[in-house]
Image (tube, rainbow, N blue to C red):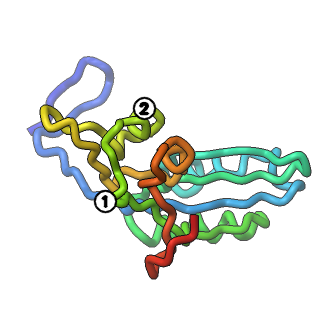
């Protein structure tokens, strides 16, 4: 069944919603590429979506970005990554993960105030700090904020690195 929206396009009653393929990547741009709109081409050419989690340009004019890139499938994602590499961008995945040490945590909530993705939040009425790793953008703000260093940075083999 088709519905007229009044805006010049139709909606079908049965709209298919697909799960997106999504991955966090780290992009390092050489000075010659840092000022070009390379990432915007991911949307235009490859129908990818991106969320900028962290971005900076160094004093040497090198760019650094942490993005969450999403696509309808892995093949489209891989085409976009290939394009980035062809443009001279170094692409890597996070080697580390944020970890909450439950024994050290005093549940003061300082980390929840700086977490941009709500990966850290206070469970009420218990007043307990909860960490949802799936929402974590690896911004590392919690590492700097935690007064008892309950938030740590671990490599995939769980050796503490910070």
The quarter holding residue 25 reads bottom right
Q: Is residue 24 above or below residue 65?
A: below
Of 105 and 116, nearer the camera is 105
Q: Do we see residue 52 in this rendering?
A: no
Q: Where is residue 98 in the image (x, y as percent from the top left)?
A: 45, 60
Residue 123: image x %, image y %? Answer: 20, 38
Note whether 32 is above or below 7 in the view shown: below
Judging depth in this view, the residue of 134 and 39 nearest the camera is 134
Q: Are marks 2 and 1 in contact (CB under 8 Å)?
A: no
Mark 2 neighbour class, 10 Å CA radius: few under 14, some 14 to 19, many 20 or more: few
14 sits to left or right of 39: left
Judging by the rendered image, the residue that carries numbered circle 2 is 113
Q: Residue furthest top?
A: 6
The N terminus: image quadrant: top left
**Other residues around mark 1 within 10 Å, as few (<14) / some (14–19) / many (≥20):** few
Residue closest to the eye, 54 or 128: 128
Residue 2 placement, left or right of 57:
left
- Secondary structure beneath disc 2? helix
Residue at image point 31% right, 42% down: 107
Q: Which quarter of the image is occupied by the C terminus? A: bottom right
Quick check: 2 above or below 47?
A: above
Q: Earlier in the sequence, mark 2 or mark 1?
A: 1
Residue that badge 1 annotates: 103
Q: 160 above or below 125?
A: below
Q: Which residue is drawn at 22% across and 23% down?
A: 5
How many numbered badges does the structure rendering display? 2
Dot in front, 2 or 1: 1
Left or right: 123 in relation to 82: left
Residue at horizontal 36%, vertical 56%?
104
Disc 2 from disc 1: Cα separation: 21 Å
């Amino acid at each position: 069944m088709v519905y007229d929206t009044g805006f010049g396009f139709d909606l079908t009653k049965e709209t298919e919603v697909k799960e997106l393929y999504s991955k966090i990547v780290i992009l390092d741009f050489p000075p010659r590429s840092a000022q070009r709109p390379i990432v915007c081409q991911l949307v235009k050419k490859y129908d990818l979506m991106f969320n900028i989690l962290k971005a900076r340009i160094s004093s040497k004019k090198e760019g650094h970005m942490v993005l969450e890139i999403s696509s309808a499938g892995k093949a489209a994602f891989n085409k976009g990554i290939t394009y980035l590499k062809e443009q001279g961008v170094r692409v890597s995945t996070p080697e580390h993960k944020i970890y909450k040490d439950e024994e050290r945590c005093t549940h003061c909530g300082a980390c929840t105030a700086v977490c941009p993705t709500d990966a850290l939040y206070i469970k009420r009425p218990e007043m307990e700090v909860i960490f949802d790793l799936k929402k974590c953008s690896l911004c590392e703000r919690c590492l700097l904020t935690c007064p008892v260093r309950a938030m740590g940075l671990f490599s995939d083999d769980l050796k503490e690195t910070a």
